Image: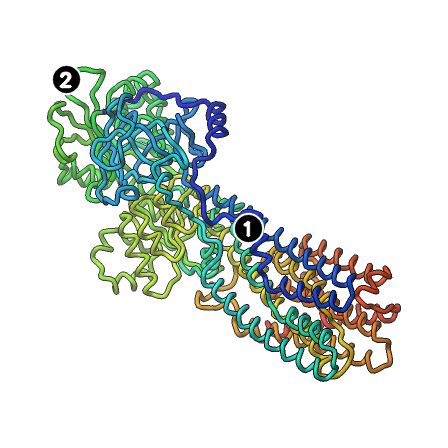
Amino acid sequence: MLDVTPVQGLEDAEARRRLAADGPNELPRSGHRSLVRIVLDVLREPMLALLLAGGGIYLLLGDVREAVILLLFAGMSVLITVIQEARTERVMEALHDLSSPRALVIRNGQRQRIAGREVVRGDIVVLVEGDRVPADARLLQVRDLRVDESLLTGESVPVRKAVIGAAARADLRPGGEDAPYVYASSLVVGGSGLGEVTATGAQTEIGKIGQVLDALDAQPPRLRAETRKLVKVAALAGGAISVLAVVLNGLSRGDWLNAGLAGIAIGMSLLPEEFPVVLAVFMAMGAWRISHARVLTRRATAIEALGSATVLCTDKTGTLTENRMTIAALYIPNGDVLPLEQQTPHALPQAGRDLVLCGLLASDPEPVDPMEKAFHACASAWLGDEMAQASHRWACLRTYGLQPDLLAVTQVWHPDGRDSACVVTTKGAPEAVVQLCGLEGDRRMAVEAAVGVLAAKGLRVLGVAEARCETAHLPATPRGFEFTFRGLVGLVDPLRASVPQAIQECRSAGIRVVMVTGDYPVTARAIASQAGLDASMVLTGKDLDLLDDAALTAALRDTSVFARILPEQKLRIVQALQTDGEVVAMTGDGVNDAPSLKAAHIGISMGGRGTDVAREASSIVLLDDDFGSIVKAVRLGRRIYDNLRKATGFIFAVHVPIAGLALLPLITGLPIVLGPIHIAFLEMIIDPVCSLAFEAEVEEDNVMERPPRSPAQPLFSRVLIGLSLLQGLGAFAVVGTVFVLAARSGMAEDEVRALAFFTLVSVIGALILVNRSFSASLMKALRRPNPALRWIFLAISGMLAMGLLTPSFSELFRFGPLHVNDIALVLGVGGFFWLLLELGKHVWYRCK
């Protein structure tokens, strides 16, 4: 028996004190990287090894200052990379906090959802079907509570729980029937209860055996594999070219140390070491940006998949609607539908008052579900507080939960402690309640007609019935009671104001929205029409059972509304859509939704009302259960992937002129322009541009007006690589021409080096600007906001000015003076190259 006496729980101040004393309720995570670990990982990078080798050669040449400066650049490179990696790690930590299981606790006498890591010893946790137990706890109250402890025991059969009392032994182990304890990470598979937390974090049973659960992937596997393969190939090719350059340079010029420096410069110019850092930063920062739209990305692969989704299957209640239910109408047998806004409490007939009371008794005494809250609010408004509170003094002897073959909840009450007959109440799907009451013929038809009237108004319809029984004779199922039909209740759940616009955006983006609900078909059609979906055809769960897989696949092409769908039928819908070549996103919140969420390409669970099982099976969690948040996530996912492609395209392009300028002197016999110190300086430009500037770029204007991207499309596509290499070759042609003409015009070697280097930086600036947008016009591209890029350009300009105006810097870089006409040439070449690339880009996109 579950006593419904109010429980106070801990005060907030005491909970904070215990949290500070015991630490958060979480286990150590092996994936966490400390600052020291990040530094050690960065020190193993090949680029750093090349910088250190260059510094060592300078020392052998006796040039201590250049060696120190190069080592300083190496330190700056390490610092920039460490800052980026640490920032990524902080983001991952924040996302881990968001993705940790939640707990429903009682504090200050009120139920509240908190992060599982904030549960403390002494907390009163509310256990409901579908949730993970947040910590080890001693049971205070139970109602048919069954728990799956297989994670701890290996036994897949759920065990029954019981309350033995405060003196229960504390040395009981997981497993076994009627134990008074529940354990962290076990799963509530039936019933409900209250428990007092006895251990948290590493002190729990699961903590003692050292199992660590980490729900967030650091990087998407496919992109990571692509990146590793590319870097490996580039590193091998760059290494071979560098060795060849050292040999040829040493043999032709006889200066092997300088030949070594030239080889190191070539190796640095060819090594695309930015790719792994860019990928990690983009995925982590992308997940963080999406979380600001109230969407939690539990697996970073979802960011990539969001841009490929072609079908979005969504629930109705709480996703398309506000999940703010109110009882709007009643139907009494042999009567009419009573709109409550047209009634007054005194005018409501006694049959209506009995219906409201019966619905209240069929609800949880302390409701969490919005529908049950609506029954409590209705009882308070129409029956008066005294009658509503009197019902709370009754004792609930048993609850019969929802079953796949009987969609109704039944509760057995013992009124006012009397030894007389018990009151049995049930509420649920109208057809289930009609079946329990045994209604046939005209009575059944009258109820079905009333259901149609209520559902046509967009109301969710529930049937309510009542029975009597003796305490000692409780049947095994609700079918053993002799129910009397009390009526129908129509609940209104308004459509979210943002939904029609969000569905229109999906349509523009080539994403078909399909509503899958357990509600009545007429209600589903009404809500779908309000949302802007095609509701001309509605398939029910019974219709699905009559279709084979091929017929279902064909039916799905023309159907956007599914009603009376059971959770297990969602899996068939997902699989049928996938068979038809669709990339499917599916929403869900219940325990039985987990298979469909797992099977979908993008599983989306509800953060507000979803169970932990659904959250664990999904790749995305809607923190506010709002359909509009899914559309925002799709928009952000497309933006993130676009920006990642822009960054990778820039990396491909920028290495071509750098490598070309490093190799050109070996081919032409002209003076060497770029040494390791110049390449290191260029890396100071390239790294933050790739990982900060491009990541911060705003979305393309047509981001939600183009069809979904094929999931088979690689990040490093041939078109992307080809266009980037063309850009890079154009940049090299410009810089190489300036270098060769200047060298053969009789200009001093240091001036040639300065002119070629500044032209290279100017051309790199043009590559940055042209790759900021795929399709924006020239003027619009200039107006696109990007504060990070502005600060980077200012820093570059300041460093270049120091290189020209400060003698020590000029000597360090071996730059000669540049005159006004030289600077004008540099700026003119950069501007002309940028304009040329912009024009070529728009010609390309118009011809596609």
The residue under the point 72% across, 73% down is 257
Q: Quadrant of the N terminus?
A: top left
The residue under the point 81% across, 79% down is 743
Q: In the rendering, at what x and y percent does residue 492 appear?
A: 37, 37
- Name the amino acid, label 1: Arg
Residue 420 image label: 2
**Quarter where residue 556 is shown:** bottom left
> What residue sits right under mark 1 in the picture?
37
Q: Is residue 71 left or right of residue 848?
A: right
Find numbered disc 1 in the image and state the secondary structure of the residue it sits on. helix
Q: In the rendering, at what x and y percent does residue 53 appear?
A: 66, 66
Instruction: Pick whichever of labels 2 and 1 is earlier in the sequence.
Output: 1
Q: Is residue 705 left or right of residue 471?
A: right
Q: Evaluate whether residue 324 shows in this view.
A: no
The residue under the point 24% across, 37% down is 175
Badge 1 crowding class, 10 Å Cα cut-off, few under 14, some 14 to 19, many 20 or more, is few
**Quarter where residue 421 is shown:** top left
User: How was this image coloured?
Assistant: rainbow
* Depth order, front residue of 31/9: 31
Viewer-nearest of labels 2 and 1?
Answer: 1
Distance from disc 2 to disc 1, alpha carbons, whole Å, reads: 70 Å
- Name the amino acid, label 2: Ser
Q: Evaluate whether residue 595 shows in this view.
A: yes
